[in-house]
Amino acid sequence: MTDSQQGEATEQAKQTEQELRKRKIRSFVRREGRLTKGQENAMTMQWPIMGIEYKPALLDLDAEFKRSAPRVLEIGFGMGGSLVEMARVAPELDYIGIEVHTPGVGACLMGAAEAKLTNLRVMCHDAVEVFEHMLPEQSLDRVQLFFPDPWHKARHHKRRIVQPAFVEMLRSKLKIGGEFHMATDWENYAEHMLEVMNAAPGYANACTEGDYMPRPDYRPLTKFEQRGHRLGHGVWDLIFTRIS
């Protein structure tokens, strides 16, 4: 690489770092506002019970849940209604939810408390850093990514979370036979997910007929999704299994 090329690469890296910092600052601002009184009370009362603080050290999940059980992690659970419902109907599973929007975390904690759940823990932090620093290797049975931001403009596609480097990092956290379940209502993003996953080493599409799975029973049908179906909008589920 020439000096000119090295300089250009360094400048691009600086710009990427600056962009990531700006995005984190915006997330931090969102985190600080818009809580209802109920959400605020839930953060105060339930976070010490169900919340996991970020720190760059591996989690002891058996100690966190006080048992050994299959573990499901959801990235970006929104307001948490679906996550709470999944944990409620499957008490034999342990659930971990990651969300950067504090009102969503508060709403999830409210729902979990009302349902008297003991098999749910939540985090309010960037999922990539959690995966990098806190999750032990081969500790998860399923990772869920439902309706992530599609970044639908072509120039923003690089911001989509489903990228080769991320799915490779995620693979190391899944047990052999564990699943990465994605769902989106943007067909272009579904095609992007499929392209990335088909090229990713160590994964196999769990769908034996075609590329996309019917919605599994464990994924609740949301009001947003029901409305989309009525309007003729599609939803695409992809499930890839870790095979190596």
Image (cartoon, rainbow, N blue to C red):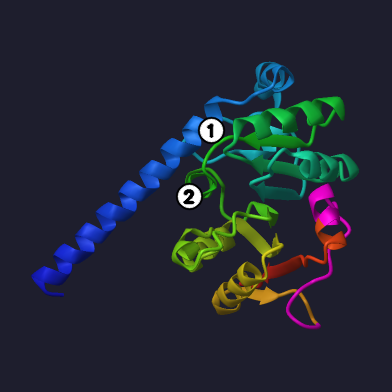
Residue at 75%, 66% in the rendered image = 237
Q: Which label number is shown at residue 30?
A: 1
The residue nearer to you, when weighing 109 against 118, is: 109
Q: Is 82 above or below relative to 4?
A: above
Placement of the N terminus among the 4 image quadrants:
bottom left
| In the image: residue 154, left or right of residue 61 | left
Q: Which label number is shown at residue 119?
A: none
In the picture of the structure, the residue carrying the numbered disc 2 is: 132
Picture coordinates of residue 211, whole percent (x, y): 73, 79
Instruction: Name which of mark 1 and mark 2 comes first in the sequence.
Output: 1
The residue nearer to you, when weighing 191 against 85, is: 191
Q: Residue furthest bottom?
A: 209
Bounds of the magenta span? Answer: 209-227
Of circles 1 and 2, which is in front? 1
Q: Amino acid at mark 1?
A: Arg
Q: Is there any visible trace of residue 201 in the rendered image?
A: no
Please give the count of numbered marks on the rendered protein. 2
Q: Residue furthest front?
A: 231
Q: Is 172 above or below relative to 203?
A: above
How far is mark 1 from mark 2, CA to CA?
23 Å
Placement of the C terminus among the 4 image quadrants:
bottom right
Marks 1,2: beta carbons within 8 A? no
Q: Is there any visible trace of residue 206 in the rendered image?
A: yes
Image quadrant assignment for residue 108: top right
Was residue 216 drawn as part of the magenta stretch in this picture?
Answer: yes
Within 10 Å of disc 1 (Cα), the crowding (few <14, some 14-19, many 20+) is: some
Picture coordinates of residue 22, whole percent (x, y): 38, 42
Image quadrant assignment for residue 186: bottom right
